[in-house]
Image (cartoon, grey):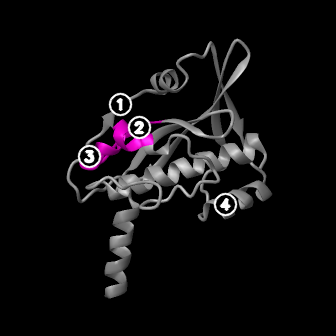
Amino acid sequence: MLGTLFWGAQALADDLTVSPDGPEHIKVYLSLEQALDKVFPKADKIWAEQWRPTSAEIHSLEIALGWRLTEETFVFHRAAKNGTDLGYAMVDQQRGRFKPITFMVQVSPNGKVGRVEVMVYRESRGDGVQRQRFLKQFRDKSASDPIRMNRDITVLSGATMSSRALTAGVKKVLTFVQKRYLHD
């Protein structure tokens, strides 16, 4: 019986369409175009590039991150102004307490976070992570930084799971940019 109850609780936690928190509260802060305009305000050219890493690259990424990847293909947004590279941006989704949080991370050509923007928040609580007061902690972080909660990222009170989701997502994007473009 205990095993059944545990499995049922785990299944509930794994089902993103069910939330014991009450009705879903979806807050759309930015569309893809709006997010790209925020992270690349000076760009005269923005384009997308798709990356399908090899098995060896996936393995290397998983080792660097410390968790398994479920996706097989990734999209990077690139930008330039007058032929000068402005960097990379990637949209990611990480699970908060019950629902995924969609956000964009912009990385400069030298591999440091420029901006992080929350695009869609789907929980009833914890949406304070979309404020720059929290997000600016990621600026100038690189793949070589720990980017760990309570180490170099201060958790937002009342939004621990959302803080964890964004912290993991920023680390993921930095690792991907490093592996794909900066060739660590």
Tell me if mark 4 has few (under 14), some (14-19) or many (20+) residues whose alpha carbon lies within 10 angstroms of its own: some
Tell me if mark 1 has few (under 14), some (14-19) or many (20+) residues whose alpha carbon lies within 10 angstroms of its own: some
What residue is shown with label 3? 24
What residue is shown with label 4? 64
For the residues labelled 4 and 1, the Cα–Cα distance comes to 31 Å
Q: Nearer the viewer, mark 3 or mark 2?
A: 2
Are circles 4 and 1 on residues that touch, CB within 8 Å? no
**At numbered mark 3, what does the secondary structure look like: helix, strand or loop?**
loop
Query: Which amino acid, mark 1?
Result: Tyr
Q: Nearer the viewer, mark 3 or mark 4?
A: 4
Q: Nearer the viewer, mark 1 or mark 3?
A: 1
Query: Which amino acid, mark 3?
Result: Glu
User: Considering depth in this image, is 41 or 144 the residue closer to the camera?
Assistant: 144
For the residues labelled 2 and 1, the Cα–Cα distance comes to 7 Å
Query: Which amino acid, mark 4?
Result: Ala
Asked if residue 100 can be seen in this view, the reply is yes
**At numbered mark 1, what does the secondary structure look like: helix, strand or loop?**
loop
In screen coordinates, is 97 left or right of 142? left
Residue 29 - label: 1
Q: Position of residue 134 (x, y in %)?
A: 37, 44
Q: Position of residue 183 (x, y in %)?
A: 79, 46
What residue is shown with label 2? 118
Tell me if mark 2 has few (under 14), some (14-19) or many (20+) residues whose alpha carbon lies within 10 angstroms of its own: many
Query: Which amino acid, mark 2?
Result: Val
Magenta span: 116-136
For the residues labelled 3 and 2, the Cα–Cα distance comes to 17 Å
